[in-house]
Image (cartoon, rainbow, N blue to C red):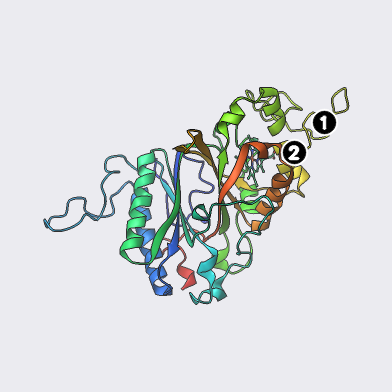
């Protein structure tokens, strides 16, 4: 199917039910001239609109023998494949050096350092982000590749880090719940209702052009698969607080049963342990804080010891970065899952609202 790019309120790729695949890329600015950034955002926007319609962004085989192609060609004939491309602006965009400090969204800043953080600098940060999701991985890849090509050709931004995700690990409205690489259903209690998007995901204050914006947090989280696979399933269930097969909370029977975090067994132990992932992350135990999770499974093949190198490309959207930080601070300190995961990359971006027809993403900055 085909998604609309213009005039959607918030940008596409957030409320959109997650497609099957993702290619994510972060970029560094290579020009401090705001005009260059403006031109890049305009060119990216028109290219994205074309690619989301399943069109090429230029000639594949130019008439002149000497010409390079305007489009690299590999998505030809694959159709729109539900492609959405979401563009984010990193903290350094809103700097004095760029002359854009006055346009900084009020809550935009670097994420605070948490004691559990131990990131690879090469998988961290960035001035621009591109989240391309599609039901065909080649369509997502083609989109990012061609946007990177435009960034390079204009001398405005260079590639910084990227992740290719091969399976959705979150659920949107009307979708069945997929599984992450630990074999558990992921996305059971996610944000799906319009009113909850409005309340928790979209920015509702500040200048008009920031409203329907959002903050995107990206974490590359390695999962220690071999260790997980030799753990007893009863222990795995206690780590998440849910049953592996059904996805039901340990306090219930069916996937969508409401978890009861207080109920105890005969020996007086909590049925859902206090250190279980869902006990620490649930809104009932976090002053009502909720975030939208739109994550994907990824693999980088094998590491240099021959272990499976794979994990979760965790992407969340919220109207205040502190909401992510509050949850991650609790998880980082106490989550039983920590024995089996490492956060290896991190970044934050402001997502401006969708452009009106004829305009482009971020036009109001200039
Ligand atoms: C719930 C997996 C990291 C926030 C869940 C569930 C699973 C899961 C299986 C239960 C099903 C569901 O409701 O979706 C994972 C894995 C992670 C990870 C494998 C890392 C590799 C994170 C991080 C955060 C987070 C970094 C936020 C800082 C949440 C929230 C819930 C949840 C808010 C819903 C809890 C509820 O309301 O019951 N996660 N998660 N998760 N996770 Fe994670």
Q: Report the quarter where the N terminus lies.
A: top left
State the mark number for residue 18. none
Does mark 1's beta carbon lie closer than 8 Å to ligand 1?
Answer: no
Quadrant in which ligand 1 is drawn = top right
Q: Residues within 10 Å of mark 2 (few under 14, many from 20)?
A: many
Place of residue 138 in the rendered image (x, y in percent of width and height, measured from the top left): 35, 41
Residue farthest front in this picture: 305
Position of 14 relative to 298 (above/below): below
Q: Quadrant of residue 83?
A: top left
At 56% across and 29% down in the image, what residue appears? 226
Q: Is residue 241 visible?
A: no
Place of residue 158 in the rendered image (x, y in percent of width and height, measured from the top left): 39, 61
At 56% across and 76% down in the image, what residue appears? 102
Q: Quadrant of residue 251?
A: top right
Q: Nearer the viewer, residue 103 or 208?
A: 103
Indicate the secondary structure of the residue bearing disc 2: helix
At 36% across and 56% down in the image, what residue appears? 148
Place of residue 357 in the rendered image (x, y in percent of width and height, measured from the top left): 41, 60
Residue holding disc 1: 270
State the mark number for residue 279. 2
Side of 84 relative to 327 (left or right) = left
Q: CA distance from mark 1 to mark 2?
A: 11 Å
């Amino acid at each position: 199917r085909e998604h609309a790019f213009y005039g959607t309120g918030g940008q596409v790729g957030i409320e959109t039910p997650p497609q099957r695949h993702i290619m994510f890329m972060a970029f560094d600015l290579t020009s401090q001239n705001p005009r260059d950034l403006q031109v890049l955002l305009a060119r990216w926007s028109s290219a994205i609109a074309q690619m989301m319609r399943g069109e090429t962004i230029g000639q594949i085989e130019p008439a002149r023998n000497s010409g390079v192609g305007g489009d690299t060609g590999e998505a030809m004939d694959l159709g729109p494949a539900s492609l959405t491309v979401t563009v984010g602006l990193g903290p350094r965009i809103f700097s004095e050096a760029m002359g854009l400090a006055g346009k900084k969204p009020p809550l935009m800043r670097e994420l605070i350092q948490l004691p559990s953080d131990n990131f690879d600098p090469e998988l961290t940060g960035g001035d621009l982000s591109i989240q391309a999701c599609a039901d065909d991985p080649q369509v997502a890849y083609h989109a990012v590749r061609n946007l990177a090509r435009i960034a390079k050709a204009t001398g405005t931004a260079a590639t910084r880090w990227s992740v290719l995700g091969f399976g959705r690990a979150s659920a949107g409205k009307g979708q069945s719940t997929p599984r992450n690489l630990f074999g558990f259903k992921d996305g059971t209690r996610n944000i799906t209702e319009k009113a909850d998007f409005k309340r928790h995901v979209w920015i509702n204050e500040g200048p008009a052009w920031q409203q329907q914006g959002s903050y995107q947090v990206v974490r590359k989280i390695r999962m220690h698969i071999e260790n997980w696979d030799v753990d007893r399933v009863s222990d795995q269930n206690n780590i998440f607080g849910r049953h592996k097969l059904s996805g039901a909370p340990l306090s219930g029977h069916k996937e969508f049963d409401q978890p009861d975090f207080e109920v105890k067994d005969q020996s007086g132990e909590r049925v859902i342990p206090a250190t279980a992932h869902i006990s620490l992350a649930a809104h009932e135990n976090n002053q009502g804080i909720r975030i939208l999770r739109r994550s994907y499974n990824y693999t980088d093949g094998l590491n240099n010891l021959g272990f499976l190198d794979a994990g979760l490309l965790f992407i969340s959207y919220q109207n205040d970065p502190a909401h992510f930080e509050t949850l991650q601070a609790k998880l980082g300190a106490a989550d039983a899952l920590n024995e089996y995961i490492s956060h290896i990359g991190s970044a934050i971006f402001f997502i401006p609202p969708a452009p009106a027809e004829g305009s482009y993403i971020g036009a109001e900055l200039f």
